Amino acid sequence: MLAEHPEARADALFELGQAQLRSALEQDSLEGILTGVAAARDQFTSAESLDEARDDATILRAALEVLTAFAQAPAQTGDEAAESLAVLSAAMNRRTAFTTRDALGGWAAPRRQAEVEWYTLAGKLRVATGPLAQVSWLTPVETLTQVLAVYQASRSLTVVSAEGLRIVLEPTVEAAFLRREGLLEHLQAALQADVLPEDERRAAEALLRGVESGGHSQGGDAMGKVLAAAPALAAELGLAGATRLADQLAKAVDESPELVTWMNEEADARRRSLARRRDPVVDDLLDRVVLSLGAAEDFRGTAREEFIELVMEVLRFAADRADVGRESGGDPVAYLFPPAAGKGAFTEDYLQRDVYSWLCSSGFRNSTRMEERDIAAGRADVSVQRVEHRFVIEVKRELSDASHAALVGSYGPQTAGYTVVGPGLSIALVLDLTSHRGGVPSLKDSVWVDEVPIQGGTARRVVTVVVRGNRPTPRQIRA
C-alpha cells in the first residue's frame, strides 16, 4: 500500500526488495535463489530511480546485478560487471563517508561490521570480474553466502537489555541450501589444497560423491550417530529432515572417523567465527582502529577495504580467544593457560598456528600463507594476499613487559619493516605470557594503533592486538 504513495514509494520499494532478498536466500535450489535475487534487484533499481540519495539501494542493486549477470551469461558480461562493481565501490565509500555512528546513534552498531561485510563482498566480486570469459567463474554459492552475511549485518540493530547489556538483534535466515553447499565448497577446497592424508582424502572424495548424488536413506539411527560424533557439523548442515545426507555422514563416521573429526573441527571453527560477526564489542574495537587509521596516507581505496576486512577477522579471533576456556577450546588453545608442571613457557608458534587455522576457516582460506619467504627480504609469520594488496601479521611472544609502550617499542619496527612493498599497514599479534594473577587486561585494553617512524621514509601504521596467555580462571585471581 505504501508503494502506491509518492512520498513513501522509494522507502517501500527498498523494504520490499529486502523482503524479496530474504525470501530468495531461503530457496532450496540455486535456480530459485537467483530468480528471487533478480526480482529483488529490480525492486532496488526502482527505489534508486526515485531517490538519487539512496546509496543503500545502489549498493544492493549493483551487487545483485553483478551476481545475476555472472550466473546468466558469464562470457558476455565482463564490461557490465566491471561497471556495476565500480558503482558499488563508489556508493560504499560515499555511504561510509557520510554515515557515522555518531550521526546514527548507538543503535546502528554493528554498522561498522556491515561495512566490512560489504567490502568482503566487493572483494569477492572483484576477483570474479577477471575470468568472466571462462565457463567456470567464482562459485555462485560462495558469493551468495556472503550476500547472506551482508543482509544479516545490514539488518541488525544493537539494543540495551533490561540488565544493561548490549545485545545484537539480527534476522534469522535459515538458508539451509546455502549452508549445505557452503560446507561442500569447504570440503572441495580441502581436496584441492591437498591438506588431507591419503586415506582421508579417498574417504573425503567418496563422501563428496555420495552427498552430491543424494543416494537413498537406509533408515536406522544415522542421525544420532552423526550428532554424537560431529555435533558442530550436524548443526551447520541443519540435518533435521535431511536423512540421506545423515546416512552419508554416518557411513563416514564408521569408515573414516578421522575425517569426520576434522570436518567437525572445521565446522566448529566456522561457528565460532560466525558467532563474532555481529559482536558489539568487536564492532567498537574495529571502529576505534578505523578512526585511528583515518589519517594514514595508505589507508585509502581498496587498501582500506581489504585491511579493514583482515583487522575485523583478527579481532574476532582475539575476542573468541579472550573468552574460550580449556574444556571448550581443547588442545588448540592450551597455550592460553599456564603450562603443566615442569613444562617451559609456550612459544609464539602456538599462537601463529592458531590464528592461521582461524583465518583458513574463514573467507581468507585461499589467501593466507604461513612462513612465506621473500617478503621485505625476510620471512613473514602469516601473510594474507587479498585481491590487490598483501598484508603481514607478525606474531610475537612477551614474557616480561606487555605494556603498550614496551610492545610497540619491541615489535613495532619489525612489523612495520615487512611493508616495504605495498600499503604501510600491518598487524602485530602478541602472545602475553606475563603474570595475570591480579587479573587479565580487557580486550579493550589489548588493541591499539601506532605510527612507527621509518628513517628516510614515511611512517607506517601498525595495529597491535594482544592475546593474553598464562590466564587464570576468575576464581583464581587474587589482589
Image: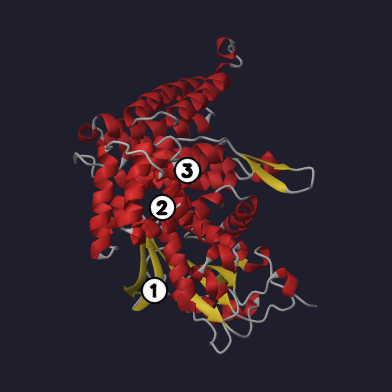
- In this rendering, position of residue 432 left or right of residue 216: right
441 with respect to 148 (left or right) = right
Picture coordinates of residue 22, whole percent (x, y) = 49, 29
Q: Could you tell which of marks 1 and 2 lies nearer the N-terminus?
A: 2
Residue 118 has which mark? 3
**In the shown orientation, is residue 473 left or right of residue 90?**
right
Which residue is located at x 29 percent, y 34 percent?
70
| Secondary element at image label 3 | helix
Q: Check disc 2 and report its element: helix, strand or loop.
A: loop
Which label sits on residue 363?
A: 2
Assign a secondary structure to mark 1. Answer: strand
Q: Is residue 300 visible?
A: no
Q: Would you say the residues marked 2 and 3 are in contact, meaning their CB atoms lie under 8 Å apart?
A: no
117 in relation to 447, above or below: above
Q: Which is nearer the N-term, disc 1 or disc 3?
A: 3
The answer to whether 284 is drawn above or below residue 452 in the figure is above
- Badge 3 local density, few (<14 within 10 Å), some, or many (20+)? many
Residue 127 coordinates in the image, percent (x, y): 32, 47
Q: Is residue 363 above or below residue 326?
A: above
User: What's the residue type where badge 3 is placed?
Assistant: Trp
Disc 1: which residue: 380
Q: How many marks?
A: 3
**Cα distance in 3D space between marks 2 and 3:** 13 Å
Quick one: label 2 or label 3, which is nearer the N terminus? 3
Mark 1 crowd level (few <14, some 14–19, many ≥20, 10 Å Cα): many
The C terminus: image quadrant: bottom right
- Residue 151: assigned label: none
Corner quadrant of residue 433? bottom right
Q: Nearer the viewer, mark 2 or mark 3?
A: 2
The residue that appears at 74% across and 49% down in the rendered structure is 165
